[in-house]
Image (cartoon, rainbow, N blue to C red):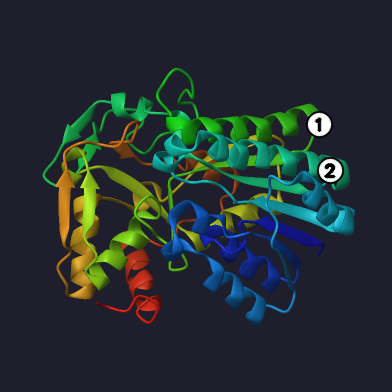
Amino acid sequence: MGVALITGSAGLIGSEAVRFFSKIGMEVVGIDNDMRKFFFGEEASTDWNRNRLIAEISNYQHYNVDIRDYSKLKEIFERFQKDLSLIIHTAAQPSHDWAARDPFTDFSVNANGTLNLLQATREYCPEATFIFTSTNKVYGDLPNYLPLVELEKRWEIEASHKYHQGISEDMSIDQSKHSLFGASKVAADVLVQEYGRYFDMKTVSFRGGCLTGPNHSGTQLHGFLAYLMKCTMTGIPYTIFGYKGKQVRDNIHSCDLINAFYEFYKNPGIAEVYNIGGGRESNCSMLEAIELCQEITGKELNYSLDETNRSGDHIWYISDLSKFKAKYPNWAITYDVPRILQEIYEQNTERWVAK
């Protein structure tokens, strides 16, 4: 079945991909140097997940390589060459707050790292399918200018609006505030499209909403549901930034996302773009998520509200999944937010020891 190369292989999406594609019989090559620990500190380290993958999966090879180091990447691609049939690129600097502190590192990881992987794919395995985990931040803050309505526990969009079922791929990515993180991901997103169009490569940018699941090393600056549940379980104080805690996100379980990747791998296109998230089937506001965490754990979350929202942050974002579902009708959302949070709780009770 060929070899799958997965960057960020010890992270949430990467590790889910490792397990899935190794299980269907592919040899899996993982690239991950635990930059998440560098970005967010010891609590966000993915070492625990990397060690588990190495111990449990016999057809998995791990490389502790930085995607910014093209010479090291070339060595790996040279080793496998045309045996590589799938590249899944999940490695990234994922926080817009962090990007503002160190724009050079953010851009070099997100943009230059993606360029390195695309060029290595072009040189050594141009027939391989290249899947990129982009982000809804490529749309900048344009979603904030939609006609939103304030409800008791969430913001919503008017039912008559064309985006009521979610934001589709026709929203502009131009002339809005993206955050520097969003800008570096725009660069990567467009590069993925351009390598597809210009070199006739099978590439796709999946513009994700909130990606989540029990293997997320959640931290304050990234990993919304996982970190919220961790704080509820352990008593760590949690801060909500702006919008009265009514900001809405759609949340997609890592399992559902990897199934979407698999559908694309079986029937790939060229320079495709899809919005991907929980859609109308799996979304929540901050206040609604807090209520669910408290209900599941039986504990009160120690939280406060900072009235200042994070610059460029979305007030309401739900993905329109209709474009992807139309082309891949066998794919569906199987996890909603309550099920996601229940699983995060159950699978992390030993790792997150209550204070």
- Check disc 2 and give the amino acid type: Pro
Name which residue lies at 36% across and 52% down.
281
> Residue 306, located in which quarter of the rendered image?
top left
Give the position of the C terminus as an image quadrant.
Answer: bottom left
Residue sitting at the far top:
175
Q: Is residue 63 visible?
A: yes
* Viewer-proximal residue among 87 and 202: 87
> Residue 79, located in which quarter of the rendered image?
bottom right
Name which residue lies at 75% across and 72% down.
25
- Which numbered circle lies on residue 199? 1
| Residue for badge 2 | 126
Name which residue lies at 56% across and 35% down.
104
- Which numbered circle lies on residue 135? none
* Viewer-proximal residue among 42 and 295: 42
Badge 1: few (under 14), some or many (20 or more) residues near its Cα, within 10 Å?
Answer: few
- Image coords of residue 115 (percent x, y): 70, 37
169 left or right of 319? right
Q: Is residue 330 visible?
A: no
Q: Secondary structure at mark 1?
A: helix
Q: Secondary structure at mark 2?
A: loop
85 left or right of 322? right
